[in-house]
């Protein structure tokens, strides 16, 4: 018997079903999953994406839905942002150039998209009278802080251009609330994984990349000795957090940043063992694939573990998927779709 996953209350569903919502980066990994869930809950959804890292195919399930609208455009263009925000009640800002290595290689473009583009969206949201602006922040904001678990009000110095851009997002969101009364909520994502996450390209995230390599009987390469650990967070936990952030009515819960994670950590050796276990259920030969080790990657923090107590207390967050359950679902999706 399938377990029933309860993400939000009936009253919160009512808010969503009567709202017009903009999702920037809506053709990307997180954005497209969010768009699908919002459509499923009866919302009118507009997606803005320039397809730099997103794919139109991610929207196949909803592209013909009468409640869905797609705008192809770039958040670096203020006019496009204004157009996208017309008539919108709530914004989920997922558009960004992710990846620490990408930002180290090309800090200028990362800054243009993640800072200038973010500012454009804040201005457009303010001018459109949007009720709430929920945005993708990042665990990279914790920088060189060694404190575990990570709590929202204790951060260190950023370790990459990408981390700087995401911290600047939080500072701008705070100023826009204080200066223009634009309500915002930032969600510091911790190593999100799941269906539709791209396994290809130089900046692919570790889980989809390793899954694809195992499926090809290729040896994944772990950066370092494999003891670095992360709070890997399945996509449906992230969707729950976004929906809660949009619909929470307690004023104390708004104009905050929240860790968006599970509150567990898994090192890279353990991760590869779990991936092999779940993939071997489909192909026993995968269990024989060896894992290799390479040098540590510049800009990477050794360990990441979130406290999600603040989200539990103020948003009623209740993550339903821990690493093993999330990987089982993700592997199943990749096996059927790659």
Image (cartoon, grey):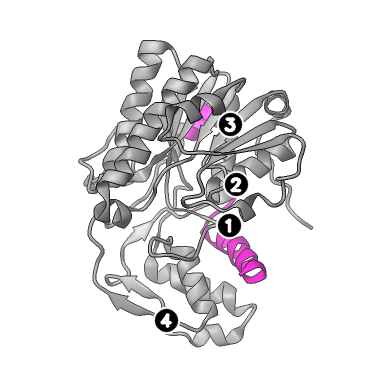
From this viewpoint, which residue is outermost toward the right? 1
Q: Which residue is mark 2?
A: 32
Single out the mark in the foreground, 3 or 1. 3
* Residue found 47% across the figure and 85% down from its top: 289
Mark 2–mark 4 distance (CA, rounded to whole Å): 30 Å
Q: Which residue is mark 1?
A: 196
| Residue density around tag 4, few if under 14, some if 14–19, many if 20 or more, within 10 Å | some
* Residue found 32% across the figure and 39% down from its top: 112
Secondary structure found at label 3: strand
Q: Are marks 2 and 4 in contact (CB under 8 Å)?
A: no
For the question of whether residue 319 can be seen, the reply is no
Mark 3–mark 4 distance (CA, rounded to whole Å): 40 Å
Q: Earlier in the sequence, mark 4 or mark 1?
A: 1
Mark 3–mark 2 distance (CA, rounded to whole Å): 12 Å
* Residue found 56% across the figure and 50% down from its top: 235
Q: Which residue is mark 3?
A: 22
Vertical side of 274 occupied by 236: above or below: above
- Image quadrant of residue 285? bottom right
Q: Position of residue 131 (x, y in %)?
A: 55, 18
Q: Are marks 3 and 2 in contact (CB under 8 Å)?
A: no
Q: Position of residue 330 (x, y in %)?
A: 59, 62
Secondary structure found at label 4: loop
């Amino acid at each position: 018997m399938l377990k029933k996953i309860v993400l939000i209350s009936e009253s919160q569903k009512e808010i969503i079903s009567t709202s017009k919502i903009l999702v920037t980066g809506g053709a990307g990994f997180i954005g497209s999953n969010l768009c699908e869930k919002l459509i499923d809950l009866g919302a009118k959804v507009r997606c803005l994406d320039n397809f730099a890292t997103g794919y139109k195919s991610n929207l196949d399930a909803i592209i013909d839905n009468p409640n869905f609208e797609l705008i192809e455009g770039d958040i670096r263009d203020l006019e496009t942002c204004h157009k996208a925000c017309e008539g919108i009640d709530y914004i989920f800002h997922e558009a960004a150039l992710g990846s620490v290595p990408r930002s180290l290689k090309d800090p200028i473009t990362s800054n243009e998209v993640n800072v200038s583009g973010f500012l454009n969206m804040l201005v457009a949201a303010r001018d459109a009278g949007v009720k709430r602006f929920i945005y993708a922040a990042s665990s990279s904001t914790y920088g060189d802080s060694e404190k575990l678990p990570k709590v929202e009000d204790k951060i260190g110095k950023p370790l990459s251009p990408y981390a700087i851009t995401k911290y600047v997002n939080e500072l701008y969101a705070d100023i826009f609330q204080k200066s223009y009364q634009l309500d915002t909520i930032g969600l510091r994502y911790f190593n999100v994984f799941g269906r539709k996450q791209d396994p290809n390209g130089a900046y692919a995230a570790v889980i989809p990349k390793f899954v694809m390599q195992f499926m090809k009987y290729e040896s994944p390469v772990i950066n370092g000795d494999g003891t670095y650990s992360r709070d890997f967070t399945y996509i449906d936990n992230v969707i729950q957090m976004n929906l809660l952030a949009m619909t929470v009515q307690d004023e104390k819960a708004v104009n905050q940043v929240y860790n968006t994670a599970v509150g567990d950590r898994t090192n890279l050796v353990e991760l590869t063992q779990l991936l092999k276990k779940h993939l071997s259920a489909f192909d026993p030969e995968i269990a024989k694939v060896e894992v290799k080790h390479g040098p540590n990657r510049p800009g990477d923090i050794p360990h990441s573990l979130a406290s999600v107590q603040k989200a539990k207390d103020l948003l009623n967050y209740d993550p339903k998927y821990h690493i093993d359950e999330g990987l089982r679902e993700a592997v199943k999706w990749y096996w059927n779709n790659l």
